[in-house]
Each structure stands twice: as structure tokens, then as C-alpha cells.
Amino acid sequence: MSFSNAKQTKTPIARPQLGTLRIHGPDQNGIVAAFSQLLYGHGCGIVDSEQHTDHSANLFFQRIHFDYSKMLTDRISLGNGVDEVCKRFDMKSALNWGDVRQQVAIMVSKYDHCLWELLLRHRAGELDCDICMILSNHPDLQTVADAFQVPFHVFKVTKDTKEAVEKEELELLATHKVDLVVLARYMQIITDNFCESVSVINIHHSFLPAFIGGKPYHRAHERGVKLIGATAHYATADLDEGPIIEQDITRISHRDEVDDLLRKGRLLEKNVLVHAVKAHIEDRIIVYNNKCVVFDG
């Protein structure tokens, strides 16, 4: 996940003049005051602010949502001011002006519950992004993409074609300036290179590492599990060990059959994934030490 003040080059659209500033670094006195005074001095009003301190790591985190509709200077000046304060306090920052909608691609195989949920929530206006494409290794969900008028691309993946296919996928993502890839139950392993090229969020059941491979719900039922859950995380080179964004659980009893576990598991998966994607596109996440600070929505 990139965490920098990189200049945005995409075509702006008409949006409220609300920006987001995320900062993190060594905990010390004066940080909150310094950034508050900086924004005030440039004519920006703070809409809301949330902060967190990891005392064990001596790290401070803050997310500031600010209104720059009456800004007295310009974006470059404020950006330079943020850089100066960050240098003074040895902080890292991410400044988003909020006027460019993120481009999101969804990768999916045959399970459709997460895909439907993302598309429906997006249509309802709950996900402030553009879902610009759906990529799959199977043609089965073409009709779902067509129903929402989202371009659907099929890439047949085999052991012999995997490397070439991934290169083609990354070229397509780069062409459309995709910011985030969502693995909505995409049943293929992506490479380190893929994870390093674009931010990737993955969803999986909570049975790892106890029940890996196929039919985990069946084997969990055989073991008589009492809790099932789902985990959404950033995909990294360590496969399912990336920074966790969102999790949820529900109880299981001896009365539940395999179909009940599957139904409850799918409900958890799609809700957890949507919450994680929403947190990402709203700039509510700061990643550090292979874990996430997720600010309230």
C-alpha cells in the first residue's frame, strides 16, 4: 500500500471540497496542535479528527478530515506545509484532496456473493469509487457484470499461462489507472509482483490455517466448530498473512448443518469485504508493522 504525497494526475470531477490528511510517526507533544494550526493558517476548517497512540511502539496516528472550500492559499502551499511539519516531527503523511474518485477492479472466480454485494452497495452509493472492470478466470459471472454494465474480462489461467496472464492483467489495470483490486473470492494465487504493483484487498474464511484447501466448511462441520468468521486483509507476499482490515464472527451450534455454515459464512464474507473496501477508499486506514489502524467511518 502506497503511503505518500504523490501528485494526483487523474481528471478531477465535481465533488465537495473535503480533503483527508493521514499522519503517523513517533509519539510526541505538539503534533495535534501543529497540524491544526497549519490547516487554520491556510484557511481550512477541520470537519472531524481522530487519533490513536500505540504505546508499545511509541507511535502516533491521526486522520484529519478538512474543508478547503475557503482555503486562503493553494494546494501546493498546503502540501509543502504538511511536508515541513512532518519533517519537524519525523512523521509520514498521505494527503488526499478528495476530488478524484478511486478506480477499483474486482477479481472473481465462480462464487458470486461478494461480487453481488460490492456491485449492489456501489449502486446504492455506499462505495464512493468507480468500479471500472471485473476480471475472472471463468466466464460464469458475465451476466452479473452485464446487469451492472461493468466491463468483464476473462483470463484463462493455467500453470503454463499464469505468468503471461498476470502480465496482461497488470497492463490492463495500469491502462485504466486502477487504484485498488478487490479479490472477491478469486480462487487463484497472485504473485508478489502483483501485490507490489497495486493495492489488493482479499477476503477469506476464518478457518485458516486449520482448514486449508477445498471444502473448509465441510471439515469445520465435521470438527464441530462453534465459531465461524471472515477476514479481509491487504494481500502481500505472505499470501493470507497481510495486514488485517476487518473481521467478524458468528456462533455455530450442533443444530447447524453444512449448508447453514455456508450460508452464515457467505453473509460474513460479503459484509466484511464491503466494510474493508469502504474503509480503504475513504482513507481511514494506516498500515504499519503488518497491521492496520482503521479509523471510524
Image (cartoon, rainbow, N blue to C red):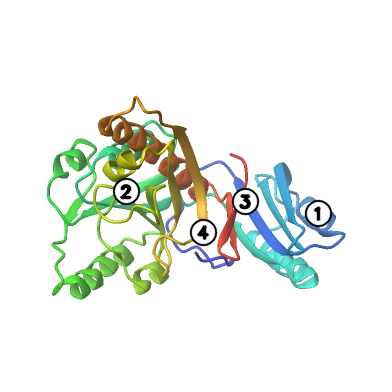
Q: Which mark is residue 103?
A: none
Image position, residue 253 (x, y; %) = 40, 28
Q: Which structural element holds mark 2?
A: loop
- Left/right placement of residue 190 relative to residue 90 reads left
Residue extending farthest to the right is 29
Looking at this view, is 196 or 100 the one in front? 196
Q: Which tag, 2 or 4, sits closer to the chain's start?
A: 2
Residue linked to disc 4: 243
Whether tag 1 and tag 2 are in contact, CB under 8 A, the answer is no
Looking at this view, is 151 or 239 the one in front? 239
Q: Which structural element holds mark 1?
A: helix
Residue linked to disc 2: 184
- Left/right placement of residue 100 relative to residue 293 reads left
Residue under the point 50% across and 46% down = 246
- Left/right placement of residue 266 relative to residue 63 reads left
Marks 1/3: CA distance? 15 Å
Residue linked to disc 1: 32
Residue under the point 48% across and 39% down = 248
Q: Which mark is residue 20?
A: 3
What is the quadrant of the C terminus in the image? Answer: top right
Q: Which tag, 1 or 2, sits closer to the chain's start?
A: 1
In this rendering, the label closer to the viewer, 1 or 2: 2
Whether 108 is drawn above or below 259: the answer is below
- Left/right placement of residue 173 relative to residue 19 reads left
Residue under the point 37% across and 49% down = 204
Marks 1/4: CA distance? 26 Å
In this rendering, the label closer to the viewer, 2 or 3: 2
Marks 3/4: CA distance? 22 Å
Marks 2/3: CA distance? 27 Å
